[in-house]
Image: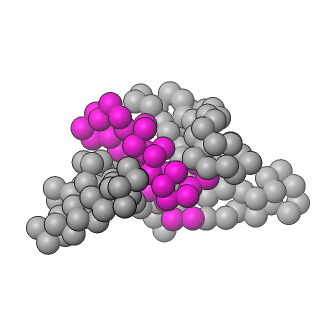
Amino acid sequence: MKAVLLQKGYGVTDVDGTYVEDFGTDAAKEVKEDSFFVVNLKDDPNFKASITGLGEHFCQDSVLFVPRGGEESYLIGTNDAEFPGYGKEEEMGSFLGGKEGEFMTRVGKSKRPIKFAEGLETKSKMQNNTKFLISRLAKQVIKEMKGDS
């Protein structure tokens, strides 16, 4: 997935996506998964479709989409999981830095406030061999997604 994101010219930061199982109960437990914070650096008009398509292809339950400006955010279902449901958009509210909740993102081990460009990887910053490998892998995944396997 990361190779495709980089190939498309997006900026990518590795983050811990977290959610709380059994939120609001005595059995509540924070669960973490490796995730990406992706920035639409080139204002790709197909960004939302690309992100949701990759979420589907890589069997993610959902993707969190924040439109330009960051005033609101949406959890978009990318498979048949119960929540939010395939193709459904669930409003998640606006950005709240430093606040914990049922769904959140944690960056780094120091727990310091996040800067949106912190740790941002782009293909243009990589060595030529790495760029070549990203291009090959991304082309293979994109071909699979189109059903041309």
Which residue of the protein is positioned furthest toward the front in this rendering? Answer: 148
Q: Residue 86: where, in percent of width, then height?
A: 64, 42
The colour scheme used here is one colour
Asked if residue 30 lies in the magenta stretch, the reply is no
Picture coordinates of residue 12, whole percent (x, y): 34, 54
Q: Is residue 127 above or below residue 20?
A: below
Give the side of residue 18 with respect to residue 82, left or right.
left
Q: Nearer the viewer, residue 29 or 141?
A: 141
Q: Nearer the viewer, residue 48 or 104?
A: 48
Q: Nearer the viewer, residue 2 or 122?
A: 2
Residue 55 in the magenta stretch? The answer is yes
Q: Which residue: 48% across, 55% down?
A: 57
Q: Quadrant of the N terminus?
A: bottom left
Q: Quadrant of the C terminus?
A: bottom left
Residue 52 shows in the view: yes
In the displayed orientation, state which residue is furthest to the right: 26
Identify the residue shown where x is 61% and y is 65%: 32
Which region shows up in magenta? 33-62
Q: Is residue 4 left or right of residue 27?
A: left
User: Total number of numbered labels?
Assistant: 0
| Residue drawn at (68%, 42%) of the image | 84
Q: Is residue 86 left or right of residue 65?
A: right
On the image, the x and y values in percent for residue 101 come to 68, 48
Residue 50 in the image: state x and y as whole percent: 39, 43
Q: Is residue 120 visible?
A: no
Specify the quadrant of the image occupied by residue 133.
bottom left
